[in-house]
Image: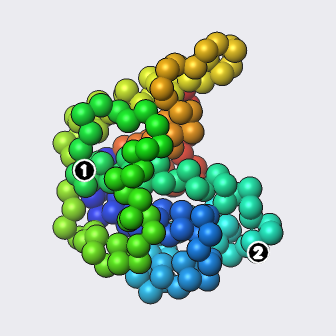
Amino acid sequence: MRNPQEVARRVKTLIGVFQAATGRKKEEVIKILKDKGLWSEVSENEKNFLLSPEEDSRFIALQLGWRAEAVYILLWALNYFNFSELPKNETNLEQIKELLKADDFYSKFDSDNVQLRDSEEIQDIFERVYKINWELRDAQINDKELPAGYHPSIIYEWHYALEWLIKENEEWDYIAVDT
């Protein structure tokens, strides 16, 4: 399992990438990430996106917009908030909507004083998300009805982020989300 400070730095980096993917000027995001000492945390694919011209990165921006869901589940892992059952739609982003747009999040979110949830609790959620992702993929592949209430892109992002959290030696860009 990764350490909480690394997870917090990934959250801050993802928020910057999300901001650029949803319309903030890339140059501003790059400056913030560099000023906050986070540029080294930006993955190779994220750097390629941030450094590419707008017209060349529209499709990638659409994909990276879903990273807000990775932020959500990683903030949950850092005890930023609780949920009693897995949320089933994008409305869960209401809890972090302001964070995703705020510059002061980089300063207010103290990545040195964060703690991860108990590893058993994280593992339990990981297993539930893995199972849901498997059910969604099985339904898509076999032309079945999707399990009620779960959005495939949300579950994929949660699965991706939790795989990264649990597997210490995997780089962000190369997480395998096998089902």
Task: Indicate the position of residue 52 as horizontal and vertical percent values.
Answer: 73, 73
- State which quadrant residue 177 falls in: top right
Q: Which residue type does callout 1 highlight? A: Phe
| Coordinates of residue 54 in the picture (x, y in percent) | 75, 71
Residue type, mark 2 in image: Pro
Q: What number is the disc on residue 81?
A: 1
Frontmost residue, 59 versus 102:
102
Q: Tell me the residue that label 2 is attached to.
A: 53
Left or right? Give the position of 30 relative to 75: right
Residue name at image x 35 percent, y 78 percent: 104
Check contact, mark 1 vs mark 2: CB within 8 A: no
Q: Residue at x 42, y 50 (%)?
A: 93
Task: Report whether residue 134 is seen.
Answer: yes
Residue extending farthest to the right is 55
Which label's residue is closer to the chain start, 1 or 2? 2
How far across and down, in percent of the image, does residue 97 sit? 41, 59
Q: Nearer the viewer, residue 174 or 101?
A: 101
Q: Position of residue 152 (x, y in %)?
A: 56, 33
Residue at x 62% of width, y 78% of height? 25
